Image (spheres, helix red, strand yellow):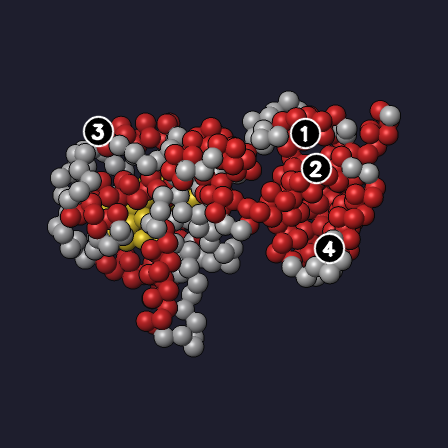
Amino acid sequence: MFEGIIGQEAAKKTIGSMITTDRIPHALLFAGPYGVGKGETALEIARKLLCVNGLKSDCTTCNSCKRAVKLEHPDLHILFPFRAQKSSESMSAWVDELQSSKKGIVSELYAPIVYEKSRQIVVDLVREVYERLLESSFEGGRKVCVIFNADRLNVHTANSLLKILEEPPSGVHFILTAEKLSYVLPTIVSRASVVRFRRLTEKEITAFLEKKHGLDHEKSVLYASLAEGSLKTAKAYAFESKSDIRIRSYDMYKDVALGDHDDAVSQAYSFSWSRDVAEAEELIEGFILCTGSVLKQKYGMDRYHNNDPENIVKLSRLTDIDSLYRLAVRLEEGLEMLGRNVNIPTVMTSIFYEINDTYRYKQHQRQ
Ligand SMILES: [Zn+2]
């Protein structure tokens, strides 16, 4: 069971016993960080619920299983954050894009999909799915509705969902996922059985990248260490261009922190003509992570970011906790300034000086 799902032993145990006792609640809610396997597990259970050979069988090959895996089973309904239809846009164009986004979900295990922050689960779709849930099932068995990111239901949409959760038609199962449980309506949470998903360990992520994607050990360890326990984030680093920036941010941070004033000046200079706000944001977010690693080292927690323990330890000896918090605040302010369109060279220059100052103080003391 759950062959493709890595880690999550506690969640698997809970769900496993629901399956062996044939007691799958009408509404399951998987809560936990981004990219740790909530959606993958939800789809796996959906497949099992729809399998013609029954929930408890090991079947993965019947017609129902095959169609469920491709999200093509007529009794499997999927809701996820998506933009509303534009007034100028035809229904079919909108549906086409929706369908291709849906395919992205199952293109591969742990596909690194990030829904844009502005996207919500649109009410029209919820209504349509309801109508279909109320009809009798196509295959005469159960019906399953998987809702990704239920923390992105607005109040309006959530209320219509609530109506159906209060009196679920028989044979209908809901499986919801959410990163922020506090953003899900309490009335929905109270009607669902909540299963917690945790961050993955660096070892689990490293092993997956090596075995599934054939990455070499060194790279796998590096991406795992940057990912804060999220396999999808690790994959985004490994296979999307964003990774280069994040890794570059670590090198820059280290150089400026360990270097002298001139190093800060020359890094700042390299941004003199930069117009790429997304890149600058990504770099600053990388600096925030680096600062967090050094802080964790200070507090004796080094679970994450241990790809370069030597330098993190070295950095932690060059500064103190107060300076690190001050730097973290400055970095957040830098992000805010970019949001207010302050020009990039100005923001980056002040940030490099701050990083250099944070670590320089003790460096001078030691000399
Ligand atoms: Zn089957």
- Circles 1 and 2, Cβ within 8 Å, touching? The answer is yes
Q: What element carries label 4?
A: loop
Q: Where is residue 193 in the image (x, y as percent from the top left)?
A: 34, 37
Query: Which residue is rendered at x = 56% and y = 38% of the image?
Result: 226
Q: Which amino acid does label 2 sit on?
A: Lys
Residue in view at x 15 percent, y 55 percent = 138
Residue 41 is at least partly visible in this image: yes
Residue contact between numbered discs 3 and 1, judged by CB atoms under 8 Å:
no
Q: Where is residue 113 in the image (x, y as percent from the top left)?
A: 44, 50
Mark 2 and mark 4 residues within 8 Å of each other at the beta carbon: no
Identify the residue position indicated by label 2 in the image: 254
Where residue 231 is drawn, which disc sits there?
none
Q: At 37% from the left edge and 64% from the top edge, which residue is drawn? A: 97
Disc 3 crowd, CA 10 A, few/some/many (<14, 14-19, 20+): few
Residue for badge 4? 271
Per the image, label 3 sits on a secondary structure element best described as helix
Residue at the spot of label 1: 311
